[in-house]
Amino acid sequence: MQATQTASGSKTMLWTGRVVSAIPAIMLLFAGGMKLTKSAAVIQGFAQYGYSDHLIVVIGTLEIACTIVYLIPSLSVIGAILMTAFLGGATASNVRIGNPSYVITVVLGILVWAGLYLRDARMQALIPLRESSL
């Protein structure tokens, strides 16, 4: 099935898409893993955002699960939607407390979809980029 999905794209696009997709995936897997450790820094961060300590493991698990779904080629579109929702919540949390790092979560969301577009012919067919005829 993956050969069909990438048949219309070049190998360069496929590998570029994999690399671009890896950036947000690694970041979210790392962040989710840190939440599972419940380190003092994570607990302090959750308090800063106004979230209860008992949500740390739940949010970390969801973060890792969304990312794993994104990394499975047949589920990557659903994973991108889930990761976008997760990153949207992170963006809202940062904006709410006035933390300018919301830019990072926005960029990661863009990379999720850019990577998927580059590595999946279904996305390229759904959103064809055309040159201007001006």
Image (spheres, grey):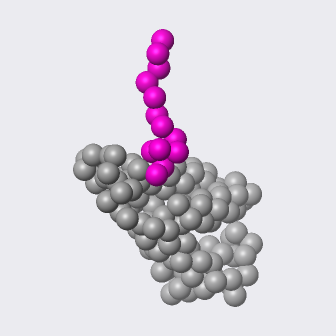
Nearest the camera: 37 or 131?
Answer: 131
Q: Where is residue 96 in the image (x, y as percent from the top left)?
A: 74, 57
Left-right relation of 46 to 67: right
Q: Where is residue 74 in the image (x, y as percent from the top left)?
A: 45, 67
Residue drawn at x 54%, y 66% is 79
The residue stretch that appears in magenta? 122-134
Left-right relation of 82 to 108: right
Residue drawn at x 34%, y 54% is 6
Q: Is residue 115 magenta?
A: no
Q: Residue 87: in sight, yes or no?
A: no
Above or below residue 24? Residue 33 is: below
What secondary structure is the magenta-colored segment mainly?
loop
Q: Quadrant of residue 83?
A: bottom right
- Farthest residue, direction top: 134
Above or below residue 62? Residue 134 is: above
Q: In which quarter of the image is residue 2?
A: bottom left
Residue drawn at x 70%, y 69% is 49
Q: Residue 2: in sight, yes or no?
A: yes
Nearest the camera: 67 or 87?
Answer: 67
Q: Is residue 128 magenta?
A: yes
Residue drawn at x 72%, y 76% is 51
Q: Where is residue 117 in the image (x, y as percent from the top left)?
A: 44, 49
